[in-house]
Every structure is written in C-alpha cells, then in structure tokens.
Image (spheres, rainbow, N blue to C red):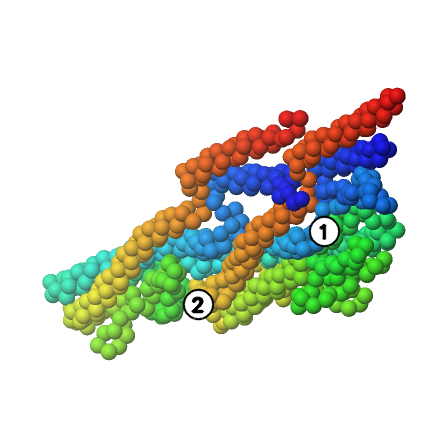
Amino acid sequence: MPGPLFQIARSGAAASRASLELVAQNIANASNPDYSRRTLEVRELVGLSFGSRDVLNGVRIEGISRASTEIVQQQARTSAAELARADAELQGLRDTELALEQSRLFEGLVEFEAVFTQLEGNPLEPALRTNALETARQLASTIRFADTTLGTARTQVQDAVSVSLNEANLQAAEIARINQNLSFTRPGTSGEASLLDARDAALRNLSELVGVTATFDERGAASVRLADASGGPGALLVDGFSSNAIGSSTNADGTVSFDVGGVGVAPVRGALAGQAAALEAQADFQTQLDTIADEVITRSNAAQATGSDQDGNPGQALFTGASASDIALNLTSGRQLATAPLGSPAGSTNTTNLAAFTASFGADDGPIARTDALLLGLSSRIAAQDVTRTGLAAIAQNAEATLLTETGVDLDTEAANLIRLQQAFEANGRVLQVAAEVFDTLLAIR
Amino acid sequence: MSIVSNSTGAFYERSLSQLSDLRGSLEGLQNQISTGVRISRGSEDPAAASRLRTLARTERLADVQEDNADKLARDLEEASGEAQGVANLLARARELAILAANDPTGESGRAAIAEELVQLEEELFDRANAATLTGEPLFAGTAAGPAFVREADGTVTYNGNTDIASVPVAPGTELERGITGAQLFQFDQGGTTSSAFAVLSNLSAALQPGSVDPAAAAKAALDGLDAAIDNTTRNQTVLGTRLAWVEVIQDNQQNRALTVAEQRSDLGDTDLGEAVARLQQTQAALEASQLSFARLANLTLFDAL
C-alpha cells in the first residue's frame, strides 16, 4: 500500500523544511547577543496498530527547543554584575583622582611652604611679603577649587546612580510584563522562545545594574530577588506579574541609600553597588580634604597669633573659614604677616615665629603630608581596584564565552546542518518519487 | 546528540577584546613617548607618584634654600668686609697711639693725632651702622633701628639686640645670619665691658692740648686697642668660617639638586629606549593578531557550499 509511504515522505519533507527554516533563523541571528540557538524537536509518529501490523506514519514536529542553561546563565549574570560594580566604582574613583590631581592642591601647598621659607631668608623684603600673601590667596582658591571639582565628581556619580536606578526599575517592570506574556503563550512555539530570549536579556541588563538572583517556574516566568550580602533571600523585585521599584535617597555627606518598598537594601553587585561605593569613598576623601583645609587655616592662624607683624602689631588671622569650601584670605597686606615673635618691635628681622610656622606646616602631620597621604591612598586604591577589575573582567569574559558556547550560534555547525537537512529533504523527495513509482507499478498490473 | 560548539559570537568577542587590549597598550606607550612622562596619573604607580611628589617638594624647597644661602653669603661677605675695615682702622689707631706715646711727639703732633682719631671714630661709627644690600642694619641683631646711636654727650651705645636670626639653607640646617654689633665692637677689658668707640674717643680726649701726661694715657690706651683688635680678629674668623660653611652648603645644594633631578627623571620620565622597543614589540603582536584574525574569520564552511 503506497498510502503511508506518501504520508511518511510528506511528514519527513515538512520536518526537514521546518528544521532548515530554523537553521536559517539561527544563521540570521548569529550576531544577536540575546539570541539563544534553536533546534527542532521531532518524534517518530506511529499509528495505532490493529492486529499484527504496525502503522508507520513518519515524523511529527514536537516543537522548538531553545538552548538554555540556568546555572551558566546565573554565573554569567553574577560575574557581569561583579564587573559592572568594579567598573562603576573605578570610574567614580578615577574622576575623583582627576579632580584632586587637576586642582594641583599638593603643588599649591608646597609653593606656600616655599615662599614662607624664602621669607625667612629675607623677612622684611616687601616683594617677598607680597608674594607670600598672594601665594596664600592662591592656596585658598586652590583648596576651594579642589572642593568644587570633588563636588562635581560626586554630582556625576549621583546622576549616574539615578540613571542606573531608573533603568533597573524599567528592566524589572519589563521582566514582570514578560512573565505575563509567557503565561499566554503556547509552549514549544517560536513565540515562547523569543519571549525567553527577551527575559534573559532583561535579566542580564538588570543584574548589570543591580545584582539579582532569579528563579523560574515551569513556564519560564522569573521571580527576581536582590542579591544579598549574607547569601539569604534578598528583597523581592519581580514576583509574578508585578514588580517592586527600588528607591533611593541622598544623605548629607553625598552618599546614597537604597530601599525597596521602604525597607533599606544594600546592593552587593552591579553598577549601583559600585556607584554607592564610589560615593562613600568620595565622602571619605571630602572629609580628608576638609581636614587639610582646616589644618592650613588652624596652623596659619595659630602662627599669626603668636607673632608680631612688620609694624610691631600682634598678628591677625591669615585665613578665614573652617573647611575646604569656605577658606579665604583674611589679610590685606604683606606687612601683616607675623614673622617675628609676639612683642617684637616694628621692623624686627627676628624670624623665630616664621620658622616655627614653616616647621609646623611642613611637619609629618601637617597639611602637606596629609595631602600626600590623601593622594597616595586614593591612587593606591585605584591601582588595587584596577587589578581586581582585570581579574573580574577575565572571569566575566570566561563566563560569557561559556554561555555563548552553550547558547550561541556556531556558523560551522549550522553550515553542516544546512547540508544534512538539505540531503534529508532531498531524500524525502526521493521517497515520494519511489512511492509514486510503486503506485504506478501497481496501476500498471493488468 | 551533544556538540561542543564554538560559538561564532564568542570568537568575534574574544578576538575583539584581545585586539583592543593590544591597541590600548600601544596607545599608552605612544602617550609615554610623546609626553616624555611615564606616570601621567598617580594610580598608574602610586608609590612612585608619592615619591615624585616628595621630590618635587624637595626640589622647590631646595630652590628657595639656594636663594637663602646666596643672600646669606652676600650678607656675610658684607659683614666680613666691614669687619676687615674695622680691623684696618683699629690697626691705624694703634699706630697712632704708639706715636702719641712717644715723648718726641709734641703737643701739636698729639693734637693732629687726636684729630685723626676723631675721624677714625666717625668712620668706625659709620661702619658699625652699615646696612645689607636690602637695607637692614648688618650689626643690629634682629632689631630694626640703627645698630649704634650717638648720645648727646658723644658716647656711642649699642641700640640693637643680641638675637641673631637663622636662615634655613638645607633640610634641617639653619645658619646664623651674621654677628651682632655687641659681639664685634664690645669686649671685656679687665672685667668691665668696653667698646672700640670708647677706647678711641677716650684716647682722642686724652691727647687734646692741655691734658695731663698724654703720653702715659696713650700707653694705657694700647691695652684697650689690643683687646679691640683681638676681638675684631676673632669675629673676622667667625665670619670667615661661616662664609666657608655657606660655600660648602652651596656646593652640597648643587649636588643634591642634581641627585634629586636624577631621581625624578628615573622615577617619572619615560625610558625612551625601552618604550620604543616595547612599542615595536606590541605593534608586531597587534599586526600578527590582526592578520590571524582576518584569516580565521575567513575560514567558514559556507565557502565550501
């Protein structure tokens, strides 16, 4: 009987063609990073048999299967999130370094020390006194500039935090929407596969912004929690069809705090974690900068208070202010610099007071040493962070490569499949031809 | 059926990151060569950057200390010149005193000597009030005013103080700027403090016509003059020694400046030979990577279809 033979060949040709279409789809998406390789699941079709005879019915298309591996994906997400955290923190620290180095704070302090040391050699020279006063004015403005640039660097990171936060909340909402769509979609369809691709892409984007862990139900709907430092279950971001937004508030020292539904959270991975860490570092450097400014003001004014100026009057405060943002020059003339000890007559060339001041200013706990320590601390931290980042980048790259090996498209494999399926299609066509010939042979019997 | 697949996307990703790493390090080297600076940001080498900051500070302070030492040397030379003048002047006064002590020198001769001694005392007063090039008194200690003042009765008294300002000329080294007028012009004679001015004016007064036994007075004045000359010579030695010290310090400053500059260059400047060699090496690696990438990327089964 040629009937089943036609049926078998037809189903075979249909399956081969469907597979060929998928291969074409794979090739077309070879460079799409969110695309996961598809294969056609087929099953032998056997009819119900009555009696001793088997009824063969060819092949049946089961559905489209999408290469996916949860563990590797979670690893790739985690390592990408770690890398994003290191990147964001490094970026914030680098901006800080640029701000503090560009302000030339250290050079300003050294110049200040130098002109006052020079004044010791020739304390009554009007040009040197004016120079010393102008250098003090320059120093005050340098410190204020450093404060401003540090503030600008902080604002940049804060802006980045709000951008990241918006994006993260959008991605979480997107995942909730995909969850909903998944529930309407028939399993095994290309529609489902494409939704799952979108789900994985959104999850990856989300975890690069803020570290998350995800679990999936049997339909592939994701339940997303914030990664927690203690390893326990974190705050719930996406649950079924609804998502919870992450909120943030800026503290007085410029650092940010995050919350989900009013409960405070601390992201451990992702760009937001890195940006928060950078802001904390910047708050620390701001404190150090304010200490340096305070040291400059306190030490200068203390020295002025124990001395007499060129006209024999007790010295007035050199600077006003108490922090890096409000330091300003107080004196108006070089004659007011108190180089001589208190009680000295006008025109004294005694430089004991000045010598004590330059010694105190250049001391190991003075502002110059503190500035060097600040810059050294900052640059060491960046250098160390850079090493960490390089390591994390290697891990992330490796995880990404592993993921691509599992889910990506290999053009060579697809080319081989193309040939194989083409042959399969041709072979099925040949079966059709044979079936026709068998039919003709039967008809030709007389 | 399980296939170990080699994802095409992963291949391109990997090649791209390798190529961009190589390009990044090439650009870093190019930057080092064109700017001549090895460390453009502190984080590239934190320890060296901190060391460079310390060296920059040392260099700046050394500049100032060199200025200070130059000024100090000038002041000391000036003081030493004045002290030499004082010594010559006192020697002449001693000659005159010996002449006056000789009996054959008559009353008119003594009067002429007394006149010259008055002149010498005037010159001594001028020298005692000499000023530095920048206008401060040389021998007043740290006081502002003239070092010596002449009272209404003609006596000269010291108006300065006994403090000597010190000048920082090297890390941890401060040198005293000079000597006070009290040191140079006042001395101890037989338990009482006398001054060169007093000796000269007493002698010239004793040689005025009508004095009782001017020859004996002149003899007696010789002791005072000897003490004054001794004192001046001693102070000349002090000034000379200090000047020599400043010169040694100036030599040291120059050597240190060289050392500091050398260290700075070692730490912070690009080693051109090394940088160029590494540039070429990296360039060769980049070119080879690009070539092999192009070959590998061309290798696809689709060409065989």
Between residue A23 and residue A397, name the one nearer to us. A23
Left or right of A29 on screen, residue B266? left
Structural distance between the alpha carbons of marks 1 and 2: 67 Å
Q: What label sits on residue A335 in the rendered view?
A: none
Q: Quadrant of residue A147?
A: bottom right
The answer to whether residue B110 is seen in the rendering is no
Which subunit holds the residue at mark 1?
A: A
Q: Which residue is at 68% across, 42% downward?
A: A408
Measured as percent of width and height from the top left, residue A145 is found at 63, 54
Left or right of B300 on screen, residue B244? left
Left or right of B94 on screen, residue B181? right
Which subunit holds the residue at mark 2?
A: A
> Counting residues from the N terminus, which is met first, the one under dot 1 or under dot 2?
1
Measured as percent of width and height from the top left, residue B114 is found at 23, 62
Q: Quadrant of the N terminus of chain B?
A: top right
Measured as percent of width and height from the top left, residue B293 is found at 57, 33
In this rendering, is residue B213 above or below A35?
Answer: below
Q: Residues within 10 Å of mark 2 (few under 14, many from 20)?
A: some
Measured as percent of width and height from the top left, residue B20 is found at 58, 39
Q: Secondary structure at mark 2?
A: helix
Do circles 1 and 2 both sit on a common chain?
yes
Between residue B243 and residue A230, name the one nearer to us. A230
Q: Secondary structure at mark 1?
A: helix
Q: Quadrant of residue A137?
A: bottom right
Between residue B50 and residue B61, name the one nearer to us. B50
Q: Residues within 10 Å of mark 1 (few under 14, many from 20)?
A: many
Name the residue tied to disc 2.
A352
Q: Which residue is at 74% across, 29% downward?
A: A427
Q: Amino acid at mark 1?
A: Arg
Q: What label sits on residue A204 in the rendered view?
A: 1
Q: Amino acid at mark 2?
A: Thr
